[in-house]
Image (tube, coloured by chain):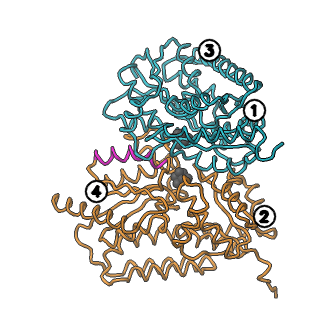
Chain colours: A orange, B cyan
């Protein structure tokens, strides 16, 4: 019998990013065979901590992820990992590492921007850095399962926001959703992931709904991190369903990375756009146009304050809004937004959509 | 695209870095160029009306320049620049530029001449100019010749700037390095005003974009391996190259600039041995109100130079 000494394993952490840490946890534990430090839900303190040590004009996701990283180190992470990507994100890690260093933290910092060439050799090198004894086939299998989990998370979430606003029994949807998240948090193999998903889906689909005949339908579009990360957008989608809306968000990890390609989406928006305008701009415009064509009642555009690419989607959204007579609410988040301010704006927006709907009907 | 004789070049953004090349290329092809007038309040006001509130000051100015060219030419040149390499990209606003302009000026139906390149296309400048020539209905050989001649002009222009700046760097007096994006440094409404202020206070002003671009780019990899933007690379590389030859650095940024928001913060953290002043210009006040800050910065440098803080 092999005895694993828990102490030998390193504790890895990523910044919080919506529900995806559950899938990352799975890959780290089952694939890299290290410990994963799953941070609890972000709080106001997380945001304050991140803002305090960030440059003033950094985009909000920088501040949120820095807050997470600091909390992770304080909670005992041995290795923290920041991702790279397009836009400013590719420089997040470099600066955050420097900030942590200046604050006196001595943990290991892995910046994925350094590995973004995506070459197989580099990836294996990175895996070995995270665990010298890594078993590559096992890691690949875990990545595959982790990706599946991310897809399931996105799928169940979509179902939740489409319907939970109309549940006949208050809290029934929430309960099923929470149970599902819990199961993903502890899943240890492929079967547990799949079963948890199927169970949640079945329960949700069988819950009684009291949907009005013409519910207000709202599409959420916008910047990658802020539009997806519920804490960053102050639980926008939850707020909208509580007002009585059915809410969709095309932008998620599944649709961005595993399904649609930018070049495949762009032809559909050619009336407005010729080129790829930025990291998620095509997704934003494509989804907005799709909602408009499908007769949605309104669109909410979400981004962090000063977000370059999503600001550049705004003139296009304005044109779509004019052409299809669909109202767009523009939300720009820094780290100091007040909750009541958001509530007021959402209520006003929802009421306007509802009124408009009645007049048209 | 109908017959094009006159091309409008908005005097903003990358025109301050590559304008000489653009103009020479078009002129070599026998076209004439109209360049919008220098930035002023009016141009800013025009642009501000068109732009989303939160967009950066240089983009607002750019839109003002585009507007002032409406009806003045057959086509307005708005290139789409993604950058040539993964670690030498442009700010995403440059990827969006032609589509932005088209959507913003949709009701005016401007004729936009564009050319597009991206770091994932594995292309190079010569090829890009061939396709620009093709968009104008020119043959490969015509475009190639025009590009060759234009590139030469551009290089000469750049060399002259470098040379002149080197002479300034050799000279005596108090030297201040203005660091930033070329359009921020030289637009009269932005850095132009700061340079004037510095000059008035007796400083010799040198610029990060008048440093040999290849050398600066190369040097920037010592500053950061992962930084993804070419203009910030040229800027930080030039700072690294010149920091021992100047007495102070003024970091100029326009509000709110994506890349600068992170890179300038890193610069301030890493470059500690020389006085540095970080100025952020916004659309409300531009360079106005900066006088006192520039003045006290100059005082500090003079004091240090005179042996203050126990240096001697
Ligand atoms: S997309 Fe927006 S939020 Fe994300 S890195 Fe770029 S500017 Fe920041
Ligand atoms: S680099 Fe900065 S100033 Fe230039 S276009 Fe981008 S955001 Fe604006």
Tell me the residue that label 4 is attached to: A295
Query: Can you tell which of label 4 and label 2 is closer to the viewer?
Result: 2
What kind of secondary structure does the magenta stretch mostly adopt?
A: helix
* Residue wearing tag 2: A129
Image quarter where the N terminus of chain A lies is bottom right
Q: Nearer the viewer, residue B79 or A204?
A: B79
Residue under mark 3: which chain is it in?
Answer: B
Q: Are marks 1 and 4 on the same chain?
A: no
A18 magenta-colored: no
* Dot placed on the residue nearer the N-terminal end, 1 or 3: 3
Q: Is residue B56 visible?
A: yes
Separation of residues labelled 4 and 3 (CA atoms): 53 Å
Q: Which region shows up in magenta?
A: A309-323
Q: To which chain does the residue with label 4 belong? A: A
- Whether residue A320 is in magenta: the answer is yes
Q: Residue furthest bottom?
A: A1
* SS class, disc 2: helix
Helix, strand or loop at disc 1?
Answer: helix
Q: CA distance from mark 1 to mark 4?
A: 55 Å
Does label 2 point to a residue whose CB lies under 8 Å from ligand 1? no
Residue corresponding to mark 1: B215
For the residues carrying marks 1 and 2, which lies nearer the camera in this image? 1
Marks 3 and 2, how far apart in space?
51 Å
Q: Are marks 4 and 3 in contact (CB under 8 Å)?
A: no
Point out the residue furthest to the right here: B312
Residue position for label 3: B145
The quarter of the displayed image where residue A188 is located: bottom right
């Amino acid at each position: 019998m092999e005895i694993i000494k828990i102490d030998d394993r390193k504790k890895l952490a990523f910044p919080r990013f919506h529900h995806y840490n559950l899938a990352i946890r799975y890959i780290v534990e089952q694939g890299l065979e290290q410990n994963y430090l799953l941070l609890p839900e972000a709080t106001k303190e997380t945001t304050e901590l991140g803002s305090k040590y960030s440059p003033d004009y950094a985009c909000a996701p920088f501040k949120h992820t820095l807050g997470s990283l600091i909390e992770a180190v304080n909670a005992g992470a041995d290795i923290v990992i920041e991702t790279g990507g397009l836009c400013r994100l590719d420089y997040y890690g470099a600066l955050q590492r420097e900030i942590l260093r200046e604050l006196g933290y001595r943990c290991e910092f892995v910046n994925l921007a350094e590995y973004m060439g995506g070459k197989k050799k580099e990836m294996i090198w990175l895996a070995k850095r995270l665990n010298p004894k890594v078993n590559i086939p096992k890691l690949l299998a875990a990545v595959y399962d982790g990706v599946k989990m991310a897809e399931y998370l996105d799928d169940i979430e979509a179902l939740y926001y489409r319907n939970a606003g109309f549940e006949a029994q208050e809290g029934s949807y929430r309960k099923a959703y929470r149970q599902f998240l819990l199961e993903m948090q502890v899943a240890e193999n492929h079967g547990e992931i799949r079963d948890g998903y199927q169970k949640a889906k079945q329960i949700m689909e069988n819950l009684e709904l009291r949907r009005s005949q013409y519910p207000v339908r709202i599409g959420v579009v916008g910047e990658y991190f802020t539009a997806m990360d519920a804490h960053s957008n102050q639980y926008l989608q939850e707020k909208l369903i509580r007002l009585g809306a059915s809410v969709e968000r095309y932008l998620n990890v599944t649709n961005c990375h595993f399904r649609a390609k930018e070049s495949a989406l762009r032809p559909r928006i050619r009336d407005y756009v010729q080129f790829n305008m930025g990291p998620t701009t095509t997704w934003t415009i494509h989804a907005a146009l799709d909602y408009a064509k499908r007769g949605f009642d309104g669109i909410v555009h979400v981004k962090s304050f000063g977000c370059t690419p999503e600001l550049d989607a705004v003139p296009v959204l304005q044109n779509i809004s004019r052409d299809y007579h669909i109202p767009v609410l523009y939300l720009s988040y820094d780290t100091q937004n007040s909750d009541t301010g958001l509530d007021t704006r959402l209520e006003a927006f929802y009421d306007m959509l509802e009124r408009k709907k009645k007049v048209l009907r | 695209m109908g017959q094009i004789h006159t091309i409008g070049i908005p005097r903003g953004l990358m025109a301050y870095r590559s304008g000489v090349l653009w103009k020479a290329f078009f002129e070599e092809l026998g076209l004439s160029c109209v360049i919008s007038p220098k930035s002023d309040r009016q141009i800013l006001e025009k642009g501000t009306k068109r732009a989303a509130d939160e967009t950066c000051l240089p983009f607002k100015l750019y839109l003002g320049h585009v507007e002032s060219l409406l009806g003045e030419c057959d086509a307005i040149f708005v290139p789409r620049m993604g950058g040539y390499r993964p670690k030498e990209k442009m700010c995403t606003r440059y990827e969006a530029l032609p589509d932005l302009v088209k959507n913003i000026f949709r009701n005016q139906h401007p004729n936009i001449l564009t050319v597009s390149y991206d770091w994932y296309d594995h292309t190079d400048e010569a090829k890009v100019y061939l396709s620009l020539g093709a968009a104008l209905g020119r043959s490969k050989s015509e475009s190639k010749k025009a590009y060759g001649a234009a590139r030469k002009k551009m290089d000469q222009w750049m060399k002259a700037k470098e040379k002149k700046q080197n002479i300034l760097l050799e000279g005596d007096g108090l030297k201040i390095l203005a660091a930033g994006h070329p359009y921020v440094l030289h637009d009269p409404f932005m850095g132009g005003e700061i340079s004037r202020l510095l000059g008035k206070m007796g400083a010799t002003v040198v610029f990060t974009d008048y440093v040999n671009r290849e050398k600066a780019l190369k040097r920037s990899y010592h500053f950061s391996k992962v930084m993804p933007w070419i203009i910030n690379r040229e800027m930080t590389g030039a700072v690294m190259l010149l920091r021992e030859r100047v007495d102070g650095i003024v970091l100029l940024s326009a509000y709110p600039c994506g890349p600068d928001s992170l890179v300038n913060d890193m610069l301030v953290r890493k470059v500690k041995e020389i006085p540095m002043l970080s100025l952020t210009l916004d659309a409300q006040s531009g360079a106005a109100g900066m006088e006192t800050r520039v003045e006290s910065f100059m005082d500090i440098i003079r004091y240090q130079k005179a042996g203050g803080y126990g240096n001697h």
